[in-house]
Image (tube, rainbow, N blue to C red):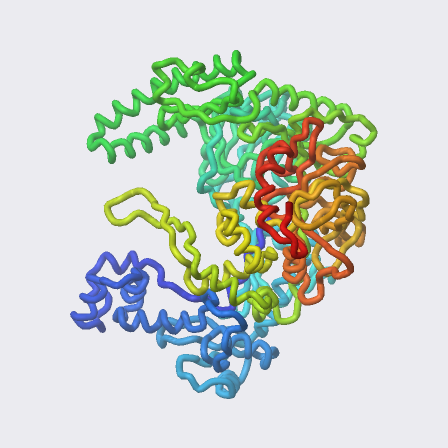
Amino acid sequence: MKHLLAAASLMVLAHAPAAHAQDEKPLSETCPNLTAEEIDGIENFKGPYSETAIYARTYCVSVEEADRRFQIQLRGSIGPRDEPGPRPQGPPDADPGSLQGLLREKEPDTFAGLWIQHEPTYGIAVAFTRDAAATLARYTSDPIYLPVERPGPSLIELRDTQDRIVNDLIRLGFAWHGAGASEMTGTVEIDLAQEAAPIRAAAERGELDLPNYVILKEPPAFPLAPPPKPAGDTRVTGFPQFPNRTDGGIRTLVGVPDVPARLELRDNCLWLYPEGEEPKIAVWERHMALDLTDPQRVAVTSLFSGAKVYADSRVVLTGLQPGEVTPPENVVGNEGCLGPYRVVRGIQPYEQWAAAARESAISMRQNELGSRAAAIADYEADMARVAELKAWRDGVMLERGDVVAQIYVDEGQGTAHIFHTAGTRKEALAPAALLPFVTAQEVPHGASALREAKDAIKEQLRAADIAAEVRIDDLQGFVSVRPADLMAIAAVSQRDAIVWPALMRVEPDWQQPFFNPDIPGRREDPEAIWYPLEAHPDFAAIRAIVEDTAFATSEPPPPGQTEWREVMRKPSKAGSLQRTHMLVAYGIGVEDIEELRRAGFDPVTALEDMNGRQTLEKRAMTATDIVIAEPVGIDLRDPGPDGFFSSVRWRVIENIKGDTSPGTELRQRMASGERANEAGEFVYGQGMDEPFLIPGLPQSLEPGSRWVLHLNDALYRHMAHVHGGEGAARTEGDWYISIPWISPARIDEKGVARPVSLYPGPIPVEELRTRIRPIQQAYRVKGQQVR
């Protein structure tokens, strides 16, 4: 996987590292320049921010001086606005960020960047490629800014070179982990996942330009050599691996679950049998090597540590993150082992993993129970119960797949969690002795139905020669199909070569609306997206209502307590400004608020409640129009400056909320549609939470189908402005987008509206009408009370 590391920000607010070495000696020795009073102020710091004392200790300054330096670093820090309109402009050297922007504009050929300098003199170092002191003096006399001569590329050249080199490496197919530019040294560093020689050779051929300030950093050699392969050993025909080094990339393993598995030698290939997954051939990183030195056992050895895992043994897979599941397209060393593949990031023998897990669990219990003996006894009791829970789980999954989707056993705690349908209860499934250790939740379908649907679609895809990843989602109750080629699977489906089981969802790579990053003034003032809303004639009146409204707010527990609490609190000035933005963006005016409140509804808090407290009624208040409609036209290739790629025309069959009449045509903009790729070819992409605009797939728009739509024309105009700036929204007629809380919902033969997204769930159309009717009746449309 390639990772692009963002270059260091143009202005870094530097915090001091922890001073571990200094902590070993008294401050009077490590900082002899400090007075006894200053040392006491550091060692017995009472201020609110511990970073102040850490900085003071690290750089041997008083806490007052540390605080002064932090205040300098924080000059110009942008907090939330609390009044409409652009922020007041200060002098160009009022803060480092403003000065930096000015120098980039006025001195592009020589300005080389700025950074915090802590020693020997504290200040903001401002670098130029030449004439630093004279150039800086033309813009500021503030002594906090220190001129620095730094030969080499200017800041603009440095950034442009980094971007160009990255694009060239991608274009030429070279492997790298990250790229960064240093303003202090004037260099661009590229962390490679391969040798540098082929890149330098390409530069000599003129295929890319490598200035002398570009540093290519090769990955370090492995500490160990690969084990020799015995002559004539045919136990393993292929050892699939990544084509390049992957050990240098950034990877965060927090929260990634470990997966017990079995590593087996089968048909001369190393197969993985992970729990809860289908067996697949392992794909290894380059630092893992096939080890055939033992004639009795096939092993895989780490070239970093020498640690081994053996074929035909239990292992634990660790560290496989989201996004790393898909194996590389150019697997090497896979002779005779052609997939399907399962990526291996971390792996260790089960016994080793279990011993570490045991010690960790005992240590945690010891902290809780006070003695190691009690901790061991508690742990062993839990582990004895784990065996019982696993035996019970295996039996239930074998016999009650009609009502049980999955049972997970937590080996560390000796508990189990069961996913069952509404047709049963955990008390009917678990024996009395285990019930106190079993939790449960309801899911839509049991394992039998899900497995049947999965097997059916896999067989059809195999017969049609369609590559796709198929998996079961136990919690949501569906079978996911992730095709390698969306158009190919749609074409096959249109020929009736695929009959989609009821529990299927097709989940391709999602396409987002296009955001134009080059809108004039947007980079300089990101807040500009809100200014048109602040010009609304009712903005001040709406804000006054918001300021007088109490919102549910979660607060951390007070001292001595552990439970978070929810309180009702009126917003701050910044909070009221932000909430008013959203109300205006959704087309909610003063009259709407007043009329809905008289009817017992509150659109002001409804928008806030979309985050975890939404209901059908609250979602309805954020839509300007809710209709039942049928598609009458689709323009797959209809891009525009508003950032959307297609348009759908709908004929209204029934109005549920709003003033749209039956027979009216509505036009909706969507992120789905055909978009030009780098080669100039138009390729269909699918927007998230939208129906498929190509036929043949589950939840495709089809002639004669009927849909419940939650639309908003005001939100379309705002999002068009966000994506494309002033004038981006279409004005010839009325245009809409769906509100984000609920996707279009197709009405089935039973009169149930089923959204194309997973949430919210299906709802009978008659219930929808009944619950929204009071909201519709609260509005006045064209001066008349809606009946």
Place residue 755 in its image quadrant. top right
Tell me what residue is drawn at x 74 percent, y 60 percent: 730
Residue 443 in picture, x, y percent from top left: 53, 26
Query: x, y percentage for residue 389?
Result: 40, 18
Question: Residue 498, located in which quarter of the rendered image?
Answer: top right
Give the answer, above or below, for where 269 lies relative to 100: above
Query: Is 725 in front, or is 176?
Result: 725
In the rendered image, the residue lying farthest to the left is 36
* Vertical relation: 182 (above or below) 257: below
Q: Is residue 298 visible?
A: no
Residue situated in front as seen by the camera: 675 or 292: 675
Q: Residue at x 49, y 18 (%)?
A: 424
Residue farthest along the right direction in this orientation: 495
Indicate whether 78 appears above or below 248. below
- Residue 548: x, y in percent? 43, 60
Image side of residue 497 versus residue 504, left or right: right
Residue 242 shown left or right of residue 647 in the figure: left
